[in-house]
Amino acid sequence: MAAQPRVGNLSNVSLEMRAWNIRRKALLMGEVQGQGYIGQALGVADVLATSYFHALDYRPEDPEWEGRDRFLLSIGHYAIALYAALMEAGILPEEEFETYGMDDSRMPMSGMASYTPGMEITGGSLGQGLGIAVGMALGLKRKNNPAFVYNLMSDGELGEGATWEAVMSATQWRLDNLICIVDFNNQQADGPSRDALAVGAEAPKWAAFGWHAQEVDGNDLDALVAAFDTARALTEPKPRVIICHTKMCKGVDFLENREITHFVRVEADEWSRALAKLEDARPA
């Protein structure tokens, strides 16, 4: 399927600025609750900016448009990051950031499709997203719908058996409309991902299962654009994966430089400091 212009990226705003805005919105939401998976949100902002403002085809005013590319958030606890991207994309009103995680909010702390426009699936039980994406991609093919399915998953999900069943199924069905994005930040609840289940040689492993595999710096926008373009334009009848190595807390130096764990604790007085640090690095 040849690369083509997207509906959702028609803007003169740079990807660098989009990523900065996503980071800022995530910090504002985190400050509301005094918590949130902000390390992951800051780290994956470049991936989300590339997805929503370069790769995806969507209509902000019509989130359920049948021709849209589907973006699945397998990692439910990354919801704060996706909400920031959905606000930046004009799918969610920006003023709703003040309701994040509150009763009756459309933005619960873990992503739920029934609550949030633009949230395609309810994440949370890790390892499920890619299986849903396989079914969705197969369904689109059977309806002759040319839309793509993008599935954002975590490196920790590479240790889930269901993930590899989905990997094999996607190969079996030649799902060339499926693009999996792995956020590889080397952190999961039990510690570094590379200390769990012998994670390693990621791209060759996916390739051995019949996927077109790329491995990139997930905080390098130029590299991300090139990888997304390659994945979308590939003519081989096979699914595609982009493994994105990201840095937790990217863009806020004092958080980047502290000891990083799966859940980065930000003290009450540090939210405004983090926003100030981000402001200092605002793109020109």
Image (cartoon, helix red, strand yellow):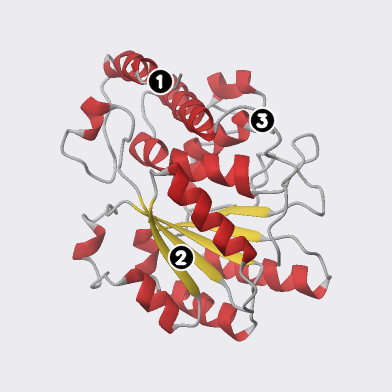
Tell me the element at label 1.
Answer: helix
Mark 1 / mark 3, whichever is N-terminal: 1
Spatial distance from mark 3 to mark 2, Cα to Cα?
Answer: 27 Å
Q: Nearer the viewer, mark 3 or mark 2?
A: 3
Which residue, given by chain and number where applicable, does mark 2 sit on? 127
Dots 1 and 2: beta carbons under 8 Å?
Answer: no
Q: What kind of residue is marked 3?
A: Leu
Query: Residue 208: image x %, image y %?
Result: 41, 83
Give the number of the mark in front: 1 or 3: 3
| x 62%, y 78%: residue | 236
Label 3 belongs to which residue? 92
Q: Distance between the residues labelled 1 and 2?
A: 29 Å
Q: Relative to 15, is 280 on the left or the right? A: left
Q: Residue at x 47, y 50 (%)?
A: 224
Q: In this view, does 64 lie to the left or right of 187?
A: right
Question: In the picture, residue 178 is in which quadrant?
Answer: bottom right
Residue 29, given in percent of the width and then of the height, sits at 47, 25
Question: In the rendering, at what x and y percent does residue 33 appear?
Answer: 42, 24
Quarter residue 172 falls in: bottom right
> Which residue is denoted by mark 1 in the rendering?
31
Say what amino acid the circle numbered 2 marks: Gly
Q: How crowded is mark 1: few (under 14 residues within 10 Å), some or many (20 or more)?
A: many
